[in-house]
């Protein structure tokens, strides 16, 4: 053991203390740096030498600069922050919807709907004059404006979500690129135990946190640059230096044919919807020649049913045979793009997926994309094979499951309001009669039964078997020239009532033309039925209708349209309030002055329970349920946000306790390392003095 060894021990002590001071200084200076993990210098005793009276140490070695970081906590944190941000995005946006339906300070749908019923109640009172009719027209327009405005505001929110989603998808892709680039740098610089790339590791961890705020991800760290980022569903986003990007793309249809299928065409659709349609063939054959399919809106977990609860099957048609109405879409089969012909047969289990909206796709390869758009089952459970967390999931949920549902319910309200009012109004009589009247609703295919899926008649499914009455009056004295019910039998002397599952629009036209001795003529123009008096000195009116045919065709109706977007007053009524039906025509063909039967029936809809697709309630109750649902959804999103935020905050705090910089602790360490450095320097001074003494002895 020599004095040189003492110098070497001091040198190592100086270096170790200096390294520790440098790291401590870096910790102090980065106390407010996001994502910075505090570091420490790991010290180990240097090699010991065998000597008398025993082993003697050779000082200290600075082994590595390590970071304080709990990987287990970080894994949990990324999961919880994704759930927190999902509900945060959902809650923040639902608050805007909640304000939209808050009518405490403005006249909204509920107020204007009550006024609508009151106006009809006023018209049912004796002595109602033209001013009351004008008042009804004005207040009805206010109701329509409220409905349309609310629907338009909801649509703007959806479009805003598309903007947010597109922006965040771009940000996620940029973050993934940065993580992959860091993986490459870490692979070059990181030598565990010798040269830890702590700054690069911190940057990567921070980027993973930023990704987890937007989508639900996890990660696998096999050391160095062998680091993967995957979605919770298992889609790889980053694998070392390789990136698998996401894209936000428009509506599309995809097919997955069974081994037994010989079909070489594609499925096509028209329209937009917030749902995703899974089409599965249940009866093989060629489109337009017997093939049938069923439809699911939750990825094949449940299937559409009819009014009786039975699974509903649809005919697979070609464009020439007629597009089939399914939900908000019209669906048909045709040649593949670039081909002019279609051949082969569909087989059972052939599956097609229609995404009639902008969706999120994972690019597994340059030629294969996988749909990972968030999808919920009918009972509100997330599809675990799709995106389920992060702000992106919140935006998609808000757009599709929430605003989409509110829009559907508002459409249902408007559609039911239109039908129920028209159902009463079409059987009534105003102060004016018709020389000619044209229906406002068209059938796309006039030769198929009106209740069939491919008829294209908006209210075809609401029609019932029965009959209706038409009266023809002489203008000169108001007497009845002829009247009667429609006869759908072409056999002389026989009679037949209307059957929506059997009779087409052409059959209705023919029945009108054969039933009134030539005094009433019907024709079809652009799919709409027109009924006219053949004598310029006569006019027509309508009586009892047990079929709903008049309302379904838009003849003698108050409203036009089918949804919250296009609900409007019938243009005939808007132009002439004399066609507002307040009374009715009795069995003798009389429309008595002061008769208020129809007005009373329409006013009675305020308290009448009507059919909303399987359940009965009033129109006002249905709207109240919608408002209540918005409030409940908003409160639920807030609760979920606060719950997951508490958990995420706790995990973040736990990580900060491990990786965060504590200034008191660092200052204490600084003093300790400073003393250590001073002591090492003193050791050099002592060794130097020893050396000088030895040199002096020699002289």
Image (cartoon, grey):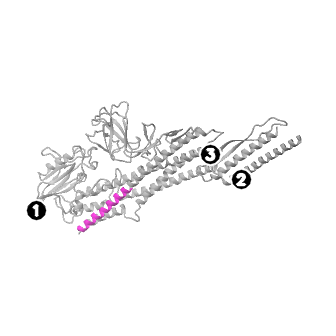
* Residue 124 seen in the figure: no
Marking on residue 476: 1
If you read the primary sequence from the N terminus, does the residue marked by circle 1 or circle 2 appear first? 1
Q: Secondary structure at mark 3?
A: loop
- Which residue ends up furthest to the front in the rendered image? 699
Principal secondary structure, stretch drawn in magenta: helix
Instruction: Work out whether residue 397 or residue 116 is closer to the camera in this orientation and state it.
Output: 397
Residue 229, compared with residue 534, is above or below; it is: above
Q: Secondary structure at mark 2?
A: helix
Residue at the (73%, 50%) spot, across then down: 674
**Left or right placement of residue 180 versus residue 261 in this view:** right
Mark 1 to mark 3 CA distance (whole Å)? 97 Å
If you read the primary sequence from the N terminus, does the residue marked by circle 3 or circle 2 appear first? 3
Residue at the (51%, 49%) spot, across then down: 213
**Left or right placement of residue 89 versus residue 422 in this view:** right
Residue at the (27%, 63%) spot, across then down: 137
Marking on residue 609: none
Instruction: Work out whether residue 342 or residue 364 is closer to the camera in this orientation and state it.
Output: 364
Indicate yes or no whether the magenta region holds residue 470.
no
Question: Which region of the structure is painted magenta?
Answer: 128-153
Mark 3 to mark 2 CA distance (whole Å)? 21 Å
Q: Secondary structure at mark 1?
A: loop
Q: Closer to us: mark 3 or mark 2?
A: 2
Residue 519 image point, x, y percent: 12, 53
Q: What residue sits right under mark 3 in the picture?
A: 69
Q: Dot 1, how many residues are within 10 Å of its Cα: few (below 14), some (14-19), or many (20+)?
A: few
Residue 520 image point, x, y percent: 14, 53
Residue 467 image point, x, y percent: 21, 51
Indicate yes or no whether the magenta region holds residue 146.
yes
Q: What residue sits right under mark 2 in the picture?
A: 668
Residue 572, compared with residue 277, is above or below; it is: below
């Amino acid at each position: 053991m020599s004095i040189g060894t003492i110098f070497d021990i001091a040198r190592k002590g100086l270096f170790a203390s200096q390294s520790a001071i440098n790291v401590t200084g870096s910790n102090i200076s980065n106390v407010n740096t996001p994502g910075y993990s505090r570091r420490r210098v790991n010290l180990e005793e240097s090699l010991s030498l065998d000597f008398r009276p025993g082993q003697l140490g050779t000082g200290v070695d600075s082994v590595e600069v390590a970071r304080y970081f709990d990987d287990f906590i970080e894994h949990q944190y990324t999961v919880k922050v994704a759930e927190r941000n999902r509900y945060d995005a959902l809650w923040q946006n639902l608050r805007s919807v909640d304000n939209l339906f808050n009518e405490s300070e403005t006249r909204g749908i509920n107020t204007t709907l009550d006024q609508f019923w009151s106006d009809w109640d006023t018209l049912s009172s004796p002595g109602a004059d033209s001013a009351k009719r004008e008042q009804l027209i004005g207040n009805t327009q206010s109701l329509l404006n409220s409905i349309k405005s609310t629907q338009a505001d909801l649509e703007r929110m959806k479009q805003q979500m598309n903007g947010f989603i597109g922006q965040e998808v771009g940000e996620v892709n940029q973050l993934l690129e940065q993580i992959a680039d860091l993986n490459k740098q870490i692979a070059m610089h990181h030598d565990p135990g010798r040269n830890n790339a702590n700054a690069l590791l911190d940057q990567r961890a921070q980027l993973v946190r930023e990704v987890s705020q937007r989508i639900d991800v996890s990660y696998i760290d096999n050391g160095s640059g062998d680091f993967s980022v995957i979605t919770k569903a298992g889609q790889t986003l980053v694998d070392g230096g390789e990136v698998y990007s996401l894209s936000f793309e428009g509506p599309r249809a995809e097919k997955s044919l069974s081994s037994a299928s010989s079909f070489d065409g594609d499925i096509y659709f028209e329209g937009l919807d917030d749902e995703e349609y899974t089409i599965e063939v249940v009866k093989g054959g060629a489109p337009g020649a017997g093939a049938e399919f069923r439809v699911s809106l939750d990825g094949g977990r449940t299937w559409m049913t009819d009014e009786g609860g039975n699974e509903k099957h649809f005919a697979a048609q070609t464009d020439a045979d007629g597009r089939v109405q399914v939900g908000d879409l019209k669906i048909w089969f045709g040649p593949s793009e670039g081909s002019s012909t279609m051949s082969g047969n569909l087989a059972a289990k052939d599956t097609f997926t229609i995404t009639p909206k902008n969706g999120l796709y994972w690019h597994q390869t340059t030629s294969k994309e996988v749909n990972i758009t968030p999808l919920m089952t009918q009972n509100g459970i997330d599809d675990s094979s799709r995106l389920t967390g992060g702000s992106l999931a919140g935006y998609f949920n808000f757009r599709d499951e929430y605003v989409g549902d509110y829009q559907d319910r508002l459409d249902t309200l408007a559609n039911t309001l239109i039908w129920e009012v028209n159902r009463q109004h079409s059987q009534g009589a105003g102060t004016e009669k018709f020389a000619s009247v044209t229906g406002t609703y068209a059938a796309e295919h006039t030769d198929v039964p009106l209740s069939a899926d491919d008829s294209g008649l908006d209210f075809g499914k609401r029609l019932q078997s029965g009959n209706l009455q038409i009266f023809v009056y002489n203008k000169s004295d108001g007497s009845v020239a002829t009247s009667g019910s429609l006869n759908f039998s072409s056999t002389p002397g026989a009679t037949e009532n209307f059957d929506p599952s059997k009779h087409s629009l052409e059959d209705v036209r023919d029945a009108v033309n054969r039933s009134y001795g030539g005094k009433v003529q019907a024709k079809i123009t652009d799919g709409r039925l027109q009924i006219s008096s053949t004598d310029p000195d006569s006019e027509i009116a309508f009586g009892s209708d047990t079929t709903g045919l008049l309302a379904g065709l838009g003849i003698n109706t108050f409203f036009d349209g089918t949804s919250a977007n296009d609900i409007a007053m019938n243009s005939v009524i808007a132009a002439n309030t004399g066609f507002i039906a307040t009374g009715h025509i009795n069995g003798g063909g009389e429309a008595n002055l002061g008769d208020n039967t129809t007005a009373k029936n329409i006013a009675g809809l305020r308290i009448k329970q009507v059919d909303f697709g399987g359940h009965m309630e009033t129109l006002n109750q249905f709207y109240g349920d919608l408002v209540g649902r918005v409030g409940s959804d908003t409160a639920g999103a807030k609760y979920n946000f606060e719950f997951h935020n508490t958990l995420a905050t706790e995990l973040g705090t736990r990580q900060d306790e491990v990786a965060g910089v504590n200034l008191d602790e660092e200052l204490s360490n600084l003093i300790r390392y400073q003393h250590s450095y001073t002591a090492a320097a003193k050791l050099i001074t002592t060794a130097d003095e020893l050396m000088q003494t030895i040199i002096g002895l020699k002289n």
